[in-house]
Image (tube, rainbow, N blue to C red):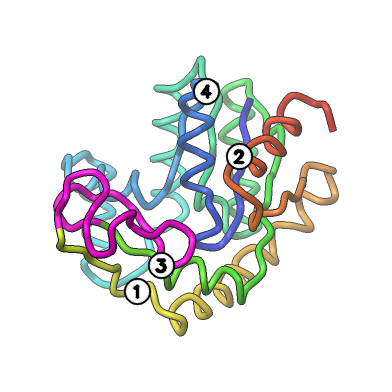
Amino acid sequence: MNIILLGPPGAGKGTQAARLQAARGMVQLSTGDMLREAVAAGTPIGLQAKVVMERGELVSDAIVSALIGERLDAASEQGAIFDGFPRTRAQAEALDLLLSERGRRLDHVIELAVDEDELVKRIVGRFSCARCGAGYHDSFRPTQVPGVCDVCGSTEFKRRRDDNEQTVRTRMVEYRAKTAPILPYYDARDLVRRVDGMASVEQVGAEIDAILDGTV
């Protein structure tokens, strides 16, 4: 089974993708991660991407498609979770071609729908242990003892520099702009399903499972 997970940063795509990988053996194909790995490994495609990225330009659809094609070949017996691709109508059509060439098809496009104001609260409140990386939240998951990590006992914590309200709202604008062109393309094929991305991790996972299992 091959699916696209849509949702702005902080909607929970990474959490659900990790769950699907563990539970179903699916492979997450995140274009950002793949580009960084290819550049670090010095692969032919990675070297092409590095030149483009160092110029401050966007990596071409051709390079991204080649990366995804390689990963699909390596994961020929496993389902794929596409994260961050496609973002345009042209990329959506390219993905259809990549799958078709490998005798595969796209089964579902699942959008994690979010409330912007609530998402701001969710992201701005995040912090993690500077030593072991354990994640916390000011409101939803504080440390049991104020100022002390539950896992390793460290008293040093950190927050991502871009976890602020202005950045989150800018991401929402960018997300809407990027997804607007592709949703009608998939809606016309009755592939889009929406779940409440603001629900608990367990509830979101249950809704996604129901979609994949065909029980809704």
Q: Are marks 3 and 2 in contact (CB under 8 Å)?
A: no
Q: CA distance from mark 4 to mark 3?
A: 30 Å
Under mark 4, the amino acid is Ala
Left or right placement of residue 77 versus residue 47 in this view: right
Mark number for residue 108? none
Give the mark nearer the N terminus: 2 vs 4: 4
Relative image position of residue 157 (x, y in whole percent): 21, 63
The relative height of residue 79 versus residue 208 in the rendered view (above or below) is above
Going by the picture, which residue comes out furthest to the front? 145
Label 1 neighbourhood size at 10 Å, few (<14), some (14-19), many (20+)? few
Q: CA distance from mark 4 to mark 1?
A: 31 Å
Give the mark nearer the N terminus: 1 vs 3: 3
Classify mark 2: helix, strand or loop: helix
Label 4 neighbourhood size at 10 Å, few (<14), some (14-19), many (20+)? few
Q: Which label sits in the foreground, 2 or 4?
A: 2
Give the mark nearer the N terminus: 4 vs 3: 4
Q: Which label sits in the foreground, 4 or 3?
A: 3
Q: Which label sits in the foreground, 2 or 1?
A: 2
On the image, numbered disc 3 is attached to which residue? Answer: 138
Res. 216 image quadrant: top right
Q: Which residue occupies 67% across, 29% down?
A: 105
Q: Which residue occupies 39% across, 31% down?
A: 70
Relative image position of residue 98 (x, y in whole percent): 56, 34
- Give the residues drawn in magenta, as a range: 129-154
